[in-house]
Image (cartoon, rainbow, N blue to C red):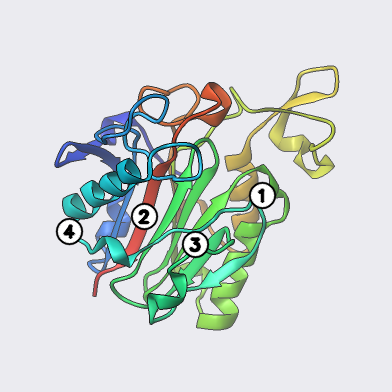
Amino acid sequence: MNIIDRSSLKTKNGLPYFEIRELSKTGWLQHAFLSRQGGVSSPPYDSLNLSDDNGDKEERVSNNKSLIARAFDFDPGRLVLLRQSHQDQILWVREPLTALAHRLEYDAMITDCPNIFLGILTADCLPIFVADRKRKVIAAIHSGRAGTGLGITTKVLRRMKTEFGCLSENLLIALGPSIGPCCYEIDAKVFRPEWESFSIPKGGGRWNVDLVAINIDQMKKEGIREEQIFRIDLCTSCHRELFFSYRGEGQTGRQLSFIGITK
Protein backbone atom coordinates (compact mmCIF):
# COMPACT_ATOMS: atom_id res chain seq x y z
CA MET A 1 0.00 0.00 0.00
CA ASN A 2 1.24 3.44 -0.92
CA ILE A 3 0.31 5.93 1.81
CA ILE A 4 0.16 9.70 1.21
CA ASP A 5 0.05 11.94 4.27
CA ARG A 6 -0.45 15.65 4.90
CA SER A 7 3.18 16.43 4.03
CA SER A 8 2.25 15.85 0.37
CA LEU A 9 -0.26 18.72 0.34
CA LYS A 10 0.37 21.12 -2.54
CA THR A 11 -1.04 24.54 -3.40
CA LYS A 12 -1.96 25.96 -6.80
CA ASN A 13 -3.28 29.52 -7.13
CA GLY A 14 -4.13 29.47 -3.44
CA LEU A 15 -6.00 26.16 -3.61
CA PRO A 16 -4.61 23.31 -1.45
CA TYR A 17 -4.81 19.88 -3.07
CA PHE A 18 -3.35 16.40 -3.14
CA GLU A 19 -1.94 14.75 -6.24
CA ILE A 20 -0.80 11.17 -6.77
CA ARG A 21 2.60 11.30 -8.44
CA GLU A 22 2.22 7.94 -10.17
CA LEU A 23 -0.98 9.12 -11.87
CA SER A 24 0.66 12.35 -13.00
CA LYS A 25 3.65 10.43 -14.36
CA THR A 26 1.43 8.85 -17.02
CA GLY A 27 1.74 12.13 -18.93
CA TRP A 28 -1.89 12.12 -20.05
CA LEU A 29 -3.80 12.55 -16.80
CA GLN A 30 -4.75 15.56 -14.72
CA HIS A 31 -6.29 15.10 -11.30
CA ALA A 32 -6.60 16.60 -7.85
CA PHE A 33 -8.15 15.84 -4.49
CA LEU A 34 -9.08 19.34 -3.33
CA SER A 35 -9.68 20.61 0.19
CA ARG A 36 -12.32 22.97 1.56
CA GLN A 37 -9.93 25.92 1.53
CA GLY A 38 -9.45 28.74 -0.96
CA GLY A 39 -13.01 29.46 -2.05
CA VAL A 40 -15.62 32.19 -1.61
CA SER A 41 -18.47 30.44 0.25
CA SER A 42 -19.49 31.64 3.71
CA PRO A 43 -19.95 29.45 6.81
CA PRO A 44 -21.05 26.72 7.18
CA TYR A 45 -19.92 26.11 3.59
CA ASP A 46 -16.57 27.81 3.99
CA SER A 47 -15.04 28.02 1.64
CA LEU A 48 -14.41 25.94 -1.51
CA ASN A 49 -17.85 24.30 -1.60
CA LEU A 50 -18.86 22.74 -4.94
CA SER A 51 -22.36 21.51 -4.03
CA ASP A 52 -25.47 23.56 -4.75
CA ASP A 53 -27.75 21.02 -3.03
CA ASN A 54 -26.95 21.90 0.57
CA GLY A 55 -28.10 25.49 0.94
CA ASP A 56 -25.12 27.44 -0.39
CA LYS A 57 -25.73 30.24 -2.87
CA GLU A 58 -25.56 29.13 -6.49
CA GLU A 59 -23.41 32.13 -7.42
CA ARG A 60 -20.76 31.21 -4.85
CA VAL A 61 -20.69 27.59 -5.98
CA SER A 62 -20.26 28.75 -9.57
CA ASN A 63 -17.43 31.08 -8.52
CA ASN A 64 -15.72 28.24 -6.69
CA LYS A 65 -15.95 26.06 -9.78
CA SER A 66 -14.41 28.84 -11.86
CA LEU A 67 -11.57 29.24 -9.34
CA ILE A 68 -10.72 25.56 -9.67
CA ALA A 69 -10.99 25.55 -13.46
CA ARG A 70 -8.66 28.56 -13.76
CA ALA A 71 -6.15 27.08 -11.33
CA PHE A 72 -5.97 23.78 -13.19
CA ASP A 73 -6.47 25.28 -16.66
CA PHE A 74 -9.59 23.52 -17.92
CA ASP A 75 -12.98 24.65 -19.19
CA PRO A 76 -15.49 24.49 -16.30
CA GLY A 77 -18.07 23.33 -18.84
CA ARG A 78 -16.01 20.14 -19.23
CA LEU A 79 -16.35 19.22 -15.56
CA VAL A 80 -18.98 16.49 -15.12
CA LEU A 81 -20.72 16.41 -11.75
CA LEU A 82 -23.38 13.92 -10.71
CA ARG A 83 -26.39 14.01 -8.45
CA GLN A 84 -24.84 11.37 -6.23
CA SER A 85 -27.58 9.14 -4.82
CA HIS A 86 -25.63 6.57 -2.74
CA GLN A 87 -26.44 3.77 -5.17
CA ASP A 88 -24.37 1.70 -7.60
CA GLN A 89 -25.25 3.13 -11.01
CA ILE A 90 -22.31 3.78 -13.37
CA LEU A 91 -22.33 6.38 -16.15
CA TRP A 92 -20.29 5.91 -19.31
CA VAL A 93 -19.40 9.50 -20.24
CA ARG A 94 -19.09 10.08 -23.97
CA GLU A 95 -19.15 13.00 -26.33
CA PRO A 96 -21.11 15.19 -26.72
CA LEU A 97 -21.68 16.48 -23.20
CA THR A 98 -24.99 18.20 -23.99
CA ALA A 99 -26.91 15.33 -22.39
CA LEU A 100 -25.30 16.23 -19.07
CA ALA A 101 -26.69 19.75 -18.91
CA HIS A 102 -28.55 18.59 -15.80
CA ARG A 103 -26.83 16.41 -13.23
CA LEU A 104 -27.81 12.77 -13.48
CA GLU A 105 -28.26 10.31 -10.61
CA TYR A 106 -25.16 8.13 -10.70
CA ASP A 107 -22.35 7.43 -8.26
CA ALA A 108 -19.56 6.50 -10.66
CA MET A 109 -18.34 7.48 -14.12
CA ILE A 110 -16.07 5.92 -16.73
CA THR A 111 -14.65 7.58 -19.84
CA ASP A 112 -11.95 7.24 -22.47
CA CYS A 113 -12.65 10.69 -23.95
CA PRO A 114 -10.01 13.42 -23.65
CA ASN A 115 -10.78 16.83 -22.19
CA ILE A 116 -13.58 15.54 -19.95
CA PHE A 117 -13.08 15.92 -16.21
CA LEU A 118 -14.95 13.54 -13.93
CA GLY A 119 -15.82 15.14 -10.59
CA ILE A 120 -16.78 13.55 -7.27
CA LEU A 121 -18.15 15.58 -4.34
CA THR A 122 -17.60 14.36 -0.79
CA ALA A 123 -17.86 15.29 2.86
CA ASP A 124 -16.82 11.97 4.49
CA CYS A 125 -17.57 9.49 1.68
CA LEU A 126 -14.66 7.97 -0.21
CA PRO A 127 -13.62 9.39 -3.62
CA ILE A 128 -11.81 6.81 -5.77
CA PHE A 129 -9.99 7.24 -9.08
CA VAL A 130 -9.06 4.38 -11.41
CA ALA A 131 -6.75 4.79 -14.41
CA ASP A 132 -5.70 2.21 -17.00
CA ARG A 133 -2.12 3.05 -17.96
CA LYS A 134 -2.31 1.16 -21.26
CA ARG A 135 -5.78 1.89 -22.62
CA LYS A 136 -6.21 5.48 -21.35
CA VAL A 137 -9.47 4.77 -19.57
CA ILE A 138 -10.40 6.45 -16.30
CA ALA A 139 -13.12 6.11 -13.67
CA ALA A 140 -14.27 8.21 -10.74
CA ILE A 141 -16.25 6.63 -7.90
CA HIS A 142 -18.28 7.99 -4.98
CA SER A 143 -18.32 5.24 -2.36
CA GLY A 144 -20.13 5.87 0.91
CA ARG A 145 -21.65 3.28 3.20
CA ALA A 146 -24.48 2.39 0.84
CA GLY A 147 -22.32 2.30 -2.29
CA THR A 148 -19.69 0.23 -0.52
CA GLY A 149 -22.37 -2.22 0.57
CA LEU A 150 -23.60 -2.48 -3.02
CA GLY A 151 -20.05 -3.15 -4.23
CA ILE A 152 -19.82 -0.12 -6.50
CA THR A 153 -16.01 -0.35 -6.69
CA THR A 154 -16.21 -3.98 -7.78
CA LYS A 155 -18.81 -3.11 -10.40
CA VAL A 156 -16.72 -0.28 -11.85
CA LEU A 157 -13.65 -2.51 -12.17
CA ARG A 158 -15.68 -5.20 -13.89
CA ARG A 159 -17.30 -2.67 -16.21
CA MET A 160 -13.88 -1.37 -17.23
CA LYS A 161 -12.86 -4.91 -18.08
CA THR A 162 -15.97 -5.83 -20.09
CA GLU A 163 -16.53 -2.51 -21.90
CA PHE A 164 -12.95 -1.36 -22.44
CA GLY A 165 -10.84 -4.50 -22.18
CA CYS A 166 -8.93 -3.20 -19.16
CA LEU A 167 -6.64 -5.61 -17.34
CA SER A 168 -6.22 -5.51 -13.58
CA GLU A 169 -2.42 -5.36 -13.77
CA ASN A 170 -2.57 -2.12 -15.79
CA LEU A 171 -4.70 -0.17 -13.31
CA LEU A 172 -3.64 2.52 -10.88
CA ILE A 173 -6.08 3.33 -8.09
CA ALA A 174 -6.13 6.43 -5.87
CA LEU A 175 -8.26 6.78 -2.74
CA GLY A 176 -8.88 10.30 -1.50
CA PRO A 177 -9.55 11.60 2.01
CA SER A 178 -12.62 10.14 3.74
CA ILE A 179 -13.93 9.50 7.21
CA GLY A 180 -11.81 6.98 9.09
CA PRO A 181 -12.78 4.13 11.43
CA CYS A 182 -11.79 6.46 14.27
CA CYS A 183 -14.92 8.53 13.60
CA TYR A 184 -17.31 6.43 11.52
CA GLU A 185 -19.79 4.68 13.79
CA ILE A 186 -22.92 2.89 12.52
CA ASP A 187 -25.67 0.83 14.11
CA ALA A 188 -27.17 -2.60 13.52
CA LYS A 189 -29.78 -1.24 11.08
CA VAL A 190 -27.13 -0.60 8.42
CA PHE A 191 -24.25 -2.83 9.53
CA ARG A 192 -23.48 -5.76 7.24
CA PRO A 193 -22.16 -9.11 8.59
CA GLU A 194 -19.42 -9.24 5.93
CA TRP A 195 -17.95 -6.06 7.42
CA GLU A 196 -17.16 -7.73 10.74
CA SER A 197 -13.44 -8.13 10.01
CA PHE A 198 -13.19 -4.46 8.99
CA SER A 199 -14.93 -3.11 12.09
CA ILE A 200 -14.49 -2.51 15.80
CA PRO A 201 -17.51 -3.48 17.95
CA LYS A 202 -18.53 -0.67 20.29
CA GLY A 203 -21.27 -2.51 22.14
CA GLY A 204 -24.97 -1.81 22.15
CA GLY A 205 -25.31 -2.86 18.51
CA ARG A 206 -22.82 -0.30 17.18
CA TRP A 207 -19.55 -0.59 15.24
CA ASN A 208 -16.77 1.66 14.02
CA VAL A 209 -16.33 0.73 10.36
CA ASP A 210 -13.34 1.10 8.02
CA LEU A 211 -14.90 1.89 4.63
CA VAL A 212 -11.48 2.29 3.01
CA ALA A 213 -10.42 -1.21 4.02
CA ILE A 214 -13.66 -2.69 2.68
CA ASN A 215 -13.18 -1.01 -0.69
CA ILE A 216 -9.56 -2.13 -0.85
CA ASP A 217 -10.69 -5.69 -0.14
CA GLN A 218 -13.10 -5.43 -3.07
CA MET A 219 -10.24 -4.25 -5.28
CA LYS A 220 -7.99 -7.14 -4.25
CA LYS A 221 -10.71 -9.64 -5.10
CA GLU A 222 -10.64 -8.19 -8.63
CA GLY A 223 -6.92 -8.81 -8.98
CA ILE A 224 -5.57 -5.45 -7.83
CA ARG A 225 -2.29 -5.66 -5.90
CA GLU A 226 -1.44 -3.41 -2.97
CA GLU A 227 1.37 -1.71 -4.87
CA GLN A 228 -1.21 -0.46 -7.40
CA ILE A 229 -3.19 1.37 -4.70
CA PHE A 230 -2.41 4.88 -3.43
CA ARG A 231 -4.23 6.18 -0.37
CA ILE A 232 -4.42 9.67 1.11
CA ASP A 233 -4.57 8.66 4.76
CA LEU A 234 -6.45 11.57 6.35
CA CYS A 235 -9.78 11.35 8.16
CA THR A 236 -12.13 14.09 7.02
CA SER A 237 -13.82 14.31 10.42
CA CYS A 238 -10.51 14.59 12.28
CA HIS A 239 -9.21 17.28 9.88
CA ARG A 240 -12.20 19.60 9.55
CA GLU A 241 -9.93 22.59 9.08
CA LEU A 242 -8.92 21.00 5.77
CA PHE A 243 -12.00 18.99 4.69
CA PHE A 244 -15.77 19.15 4.89
CA SER A 245 -17.26 16.49 7.18
CA TYR A 246 -20.98 15.77 7.31
CA ARG A 247 -20.54 13.55 10.37
CA GLY A 248 -18.50 16.18 12.13
CA GLU A 249 -20.46 19.28 11.15
CA GLY A 250 -23.93 18.42 9.92
CA GLN A 251 -24.77 21.23 7.50
CA THR A 252 -21.60 21.79 5.51
CA GLY A 253 -20.13 21.91 2.00
CA ARG A 254 -18.64 19.33 -0.34
CA GLN A 255 -15.07 19.24 -1.63
CA LEU A 256 -14.25 18.31 -5.20
CA SER A 257 -12.00 15.55 -6.47
CA PHE A 258 -11.54 15.42 -10.25
CA ILE A 259 -9.71 13.40 -12.88
CA GLY A 260 -9.46 13.89 -16.63
CA ILE A 261 -7.62 12.72 -19.74
CA THR A 262 -5.68 15.63 -21.18
CA LYS A 263 -4.36 14.05 -24.40
* Residue depicted at x 17% and y 53%: 70
Measure the C-alpha gap from mark 3 to mark 2.
Answer: 16 Å
**Residue corresponding to mark 3:** 103
Measure the C-alpha gap from mark 3 to mark 4.
Answer: 22 Å
Of marks 1 and 3, which one's residue comes earlier in the chain?
A: 3
* Residue that lies at the very extreme toward the top in this rendered image: 203
Which label sits on residue 171?
A: none
Of marks 3 and 4, which one's residue comes earlier in the chain?
A: 4
- Estimate the x, y position of residue 188 in percent, counting from the top left: 84, 31
Measure the C-alpha gap from mark 2 to mark 1.
Answer: 20 Å
Position above or below: 85 against 239: below
Position above or below: 204 against 252: above
Measure the C-alpha gap from mark 1 to mark 4.
Answer: 33 Å
* Residue depicted at x 48% and y 42%: 122
**Residue corresponding to mark 4:** 73
Which label sits on residue 258?
A: 2
Classify residue 36 as left or right of residue 130. left
Q: Nearer the viewer, mark 1 or mark 4?
A: 4
Residue 25 figure quarter: bottom left
Density class for disc 2 (Cα within 10 Å; few <14, some 14-19, many ≥20) is many
Relative depth, front residue between 248 and 3: 248
The reply to whether dot 1 and dot 3 touch (C-beta < 8 Å) is: no
Residue 201 figure quarter: top right
Of marks 2 and 1, which one's residue comes earlier in the chain?
A: 1
